[in-house]
């Protein structure tokens, strides 16, 4: 059994503790921590009663009984806990974003390379999603011809009060940044952000929606609508327009109903359900790979690339211009752990 310590017992922390302790094979949660101690104690009692509740994340990382770390605290805290795990020589799965700025992600990349071991995996779970994998197969088979354009939407029904500032770009959009780069096997060269009319459903201090435009090295043009107060539900759309055909991301499975004069499908309301299988596959593969001593999932470099892109998008939003995305060569260290689905 891989003995795991989880830092952050909020929304996704609770989801991951449940799957790591009670659902997946080969792991057990032996330690938890949250800055909100009462919540950590309540979560431990309910989901993993024998786990030790730590006063702070650093003590948890250092504890001899903890073999691997999962970081599910707020984004701004990720850097310090991932760096602590690397310093302790322990594998660490960190929810996206790896950190909230490119500079912070680069600190992690540099620390990992200096340690000489692949210890970091980032929670970009869409790469494990069956529907994205089917779409990727269509692209890679050549069935669509060369991709020319990609149209996407990332719609949430609502967001918590702590979701503010540019989090549409730094917290929601990183999923598209990562999965589209993986889907197209391409990198980005520029970003632009256009602000449509604001929805009446958004809080006064929150900009919503955003329209984000990316250009890739191969010349593919991508547009992504990020709309986090979309009253009808949680809806992730992706359409790849190729030279010879158009591929659509499959919709989540649901029963087609003929009822009350309508022909309808249910629309999901919650990100936890839309990607429930992907989180399971992602973390099961992480557990298995940690035990084998080879971390195979999205790397700290992927997390860094996402942060460089997000930073460029934030700059583009505030300047109104087209901002180049410049990133140096990927260190050879990361070539060996390019993502390979099991
Ligand atoms: P949340 O706000 O529900 O939970 C965050 C938890 O971190 C809170 O319980 C908070 O008390 C704790 N925390 C904050 N600072 C801490 C510190 N210094 N030490 C220990 N605990 C601390 O947030 P949520 O939605 O669970 O998100 C957490 C992370 O997971 C974020 O990075 C988010 O982007 C990511 N996430 C990823 C998703 C995915 O689909 N992969 C979905 C939802 C969240
Ligand atoms: P949340 O606010 O529900 O939980 C965050 C928790 O972190 C809170 O309980 C908070 O008290 C705790 N925390 C904050 N600072 C801490 C610290 N210094 N030490 C310990 N705990 C601390 O947020 P969430 O929705 O669970 O999101 C958490 C992370 O997961 C974010 O990075 C988010 O982007 C990511 N996330 C990913 C997905 C996904 O689909 N992969 C979905 C949701 C969230
Ligand atoms: C959240 O943090 C996630 O990661 C969800 O998957 C995403 O859809 C949501 O917009 C983010 O806030």
Image: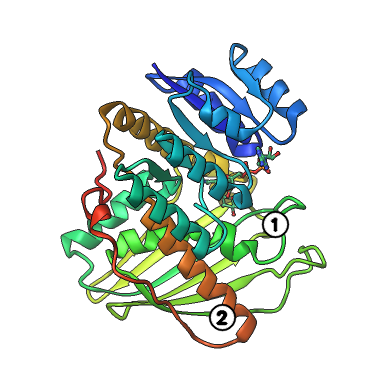
Mark drawn on residue 316: 2
Q: Which quarter of the rendered picture does the N terminus lie within?
A: top left
Residue matched to label 1: 231
Give the residue drawn at x 43%, y 33%. Answer: 280
Q: Is residue 92 above or below residue 250?
A: above
Residue 99: x, y in percent? 53, 54
Local secondary structure at mark 2:
helix
Q: In which quarter of the image is residue 278?
A: top left
Give the residue drawn at x 55%, y 24%. Answer: 18
| Closer to the camera in the image, 138 or 221 | 221
Does residue 54 appear left or right of residue 144 in this picture? Answer: right
Q: Nearer the viewer, mark 2 or mark 1?
A: 2
Does residue 179 appear left or right of residue 54 in this picture? Answer: left
The number of callouts visible is 2
Q: Ligand 1: give its quadrant.
A: top right
Which residue is the extreme one toward the right? 204
């Amino acid at each position: 059994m891989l003995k795991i310590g989880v830092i952050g017992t909020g929304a996704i922390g609770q989801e991951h503790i449940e799957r790591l302790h009670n659902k997946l094979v080969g792991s057990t949660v032996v330690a938890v921590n949250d800055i909100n101690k009462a919540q950590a104690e309540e979560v431990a009692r309910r989901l993993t009663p024998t786990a030790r509740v730590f006063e702070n994340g650093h003590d948890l990382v250092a504890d001899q009984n903890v073999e691997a770390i999962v970081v599910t605290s707020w984004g701004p805290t990720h850097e310090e806990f991932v760096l602590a795990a690397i310093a302790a020589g322990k594998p660490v799965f960190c929810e996206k974003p790896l950190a909230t700025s490119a500079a912070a992600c680069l600190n992690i990349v540099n620390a990992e390379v200096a340690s000489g071991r692949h210890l970091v995996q980032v929670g970009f779970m869409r790469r494990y999603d069956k529907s994205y994998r089917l779409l990727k197969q269509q692209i890679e088979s050549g069935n669509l011809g060369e991709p020319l354009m990609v149209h996407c939407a990332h719609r949430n029904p609502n967001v918590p009060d702590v979701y503010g500032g540019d989090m549409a770009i730094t917290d929601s959009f990183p999923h598209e940044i990562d999965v589209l780069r993986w889907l197209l096997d391409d990198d980005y060269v520029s970003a632009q952000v256009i602000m449509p009319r604001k929805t009446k459903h958004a809080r006064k201090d929150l900009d919503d929606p955003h329209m984000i435009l990316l250009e890739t090295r191969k010349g593919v043009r991508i547009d992504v609508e990020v709309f986090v107060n979309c009253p009808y539900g949680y809806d992730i759309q992706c359409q790849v327009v190729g030279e010879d055909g158009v591929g659509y991301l499959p919709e989540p499975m649901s029963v087609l109903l003929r009822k009350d004069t309508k022909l309808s499908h249910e629309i999901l309301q919650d990100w936890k359900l839309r990607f429930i299988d992907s989180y399971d596959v992602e973390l099961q593969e992480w557990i298995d790979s940690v035990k084998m001593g080879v971390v195979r999932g999205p790397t700290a470099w992927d997390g860094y690339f996402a942060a460089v892109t997000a930073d460029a998008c934030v700059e583009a939003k505030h300047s109104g211009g087209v901002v180049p995305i410049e990133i140096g060569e990927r260190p050879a260290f990361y070539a060996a752990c390019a993502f390979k689905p099991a």
